[in-house]
Image (cartoon, rainbow, N blue to C red):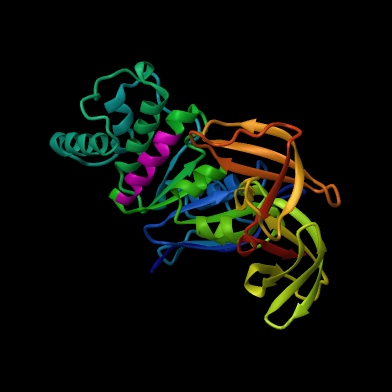
């Protein structure tokens, strides 16, 4: 695939703060790419550097193999959807969408056709004359998208565009954005702090911390094979155990843990291979509570210390009998299932193939 956007060792400081610290990325043409991380990690600054609202202190940004060094935002093949939508309240829907066409030499028919195509694309056909003040949050978001897409940019930049929406509408818009991106076929670069949002919509995700890119991967690889403990703890929930290891050919032998002794393949482990200590991570859904009426081998015993019922999922906090280790377990709810209670003694097992290890 052809790289649409390349970020080459870009640095940007604001005083003593290293907002973007030596970031390099390659974003393929037609990808839905997300920049994910906590507040202050540098993701919005990086997006603004791509847009041209800020300029790097060093490094370079290329779009279609052309350096953007010194190129103003209005001369770049990009457009941006802002967090607050930036809808003009004194203009109706059509006037807002057409705002970017005001300096274009178009006939009335060409202009009308482009507006109607953009509105149809975002599901707002027939609302041309509606006042901006009469729009819902979701409709305002669609108007902002139509206005950004009407100029047919090669790259659409989205700065936390769904953060102001309620949960149900946000989930609906995630699906719509994904379908819209595939329909228009242009590169989308999304900034978000919402892990679920990034995993749901993206082809590739870059996780950022302290101005640096920690990992770039597909959503599945990011969740199932995080490369650092920091990424693992940020993307979903994770149980961590500190262990000692011994080299054992193609695998690593983990010893003296609450889980007993077991082997990990080297593919399950990332980090410095010289370290003799390791942190292993286990997702809550990879731990199963065992039926009491059946006998199992290689199980762990403990007591339920807390229960959180979330509708489709229940989270259990388990205190183990050995070493007083606390495990978080998630279980998909179904009708007729056994309802566990706080204080109940249970047995559980771990899917060892799902374990990841970090030698940091």
Q: Quick check: is 86 in the magenta stretch?
A: no
Q: Is residue 190 above or below residue 205?
A: above
Q: Quick check: is 181 in the magenta stretch?
A: yes
Viewer-proximal residue, 72 or 84?
A: 84
Residue lying at 53% horizontally and 43% vertically, measured from the top left: 196
Q: Which residues are magenta?
A: 171-182
Quarter of the image where the N terminus is located: bottom left
What is the x, y in percent for residue 226? 62, 59
Q: Is residue 172 above or below residue 251?
A: above
Q: Main secondary structure of the magenta part?
A: helix
- Lateral position of residue 243 relative to residue 166, left or right: right
- Lateral position of residue 355 relative to residue 334, left or right: right
Residue lying at 20% horizontally and 25% vertically, measured from the top left: 126
What is the x, y in percent for residue 89? 40, 20
Would you say residue 187 is visible in this rendering? yes
Residue lying at 60% horizontally and 48% vertically, measured from the top left: 285
- Lateral position of residue 332 relative to residue 243, left or right: left
Q: Quadrant of residue 223?
A: bottom right
């Amino acid at each position: 695939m052809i790289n649409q956007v390349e970020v080459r060792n870009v640095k940007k400081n604001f005083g003593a703060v290293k907002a973007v610290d030596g970031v390099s990325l390659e974003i393929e043409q037609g990808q839905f790419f997300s920049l994910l991380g906590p507040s202050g990690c540098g993701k919005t600054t990086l997006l603004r550097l791509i847009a041209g609202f800020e300029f790097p202190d060093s490094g370079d940004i290329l779009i279609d193999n052309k350096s953007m060094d010194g190129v103003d935002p209005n001369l770049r093949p990009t457009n941006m959807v802002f967090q607050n939508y930036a809808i003009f309240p004194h203009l109706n829907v059509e006037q807002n969408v057409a705002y970017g066409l005001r300096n274009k030499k178009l006939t009335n028919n060409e202009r009308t056709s482009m507006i109607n195509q953009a509105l149809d694309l975002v599901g707002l056909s027939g609302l041309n004359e509606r006042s901006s003040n009469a729009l819902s949050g979701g409709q305002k978001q669609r108007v902002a998208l139509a206005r950004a897409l009407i100029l047919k940019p090669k790259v659409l930049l989205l700065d936390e565009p769904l953060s102001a929406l309620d949960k149900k509408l946000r989930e609906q818009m995630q699906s719509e954005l994904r379908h819209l991106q595939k329909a228009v076929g242009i590169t989308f670069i999304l900034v978000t702090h919402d892990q679920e949002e990034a995993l749901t919509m993206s082809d590739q995700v870059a996780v950022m911390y302290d101005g640096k890119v920690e990992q770039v991967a597909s959503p599945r690889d990011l969740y199932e094979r995080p490369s650092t403990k920091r990424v693992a703890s940020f993307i979903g929930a994770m149980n961590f155990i500190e262990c000692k290891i011994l080299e054992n050919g193609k695998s690593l032998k983990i010893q003296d843990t609450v889980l007993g002794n077991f082997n990990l393949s080297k593919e399950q482990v990332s980090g410095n291979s010289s370290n003799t200590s390791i942190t292993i991570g286990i997702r809550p859904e990879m731990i199963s509570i065992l039926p009491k009426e059946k006998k199992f081998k290689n199980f762990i015993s403990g007591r339920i210390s807390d229960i959180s019922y979330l509708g489709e999922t229940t989270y259990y906090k388990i205190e183990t009998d050995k070493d007083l280790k606390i495990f978080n377990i998630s279980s998909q709810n179904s009708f007729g299932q056994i309802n566990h209670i706080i204080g109940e003694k249970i047995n559980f097992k771990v899917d060892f193939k799902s374990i990841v290890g970090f030698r940091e």
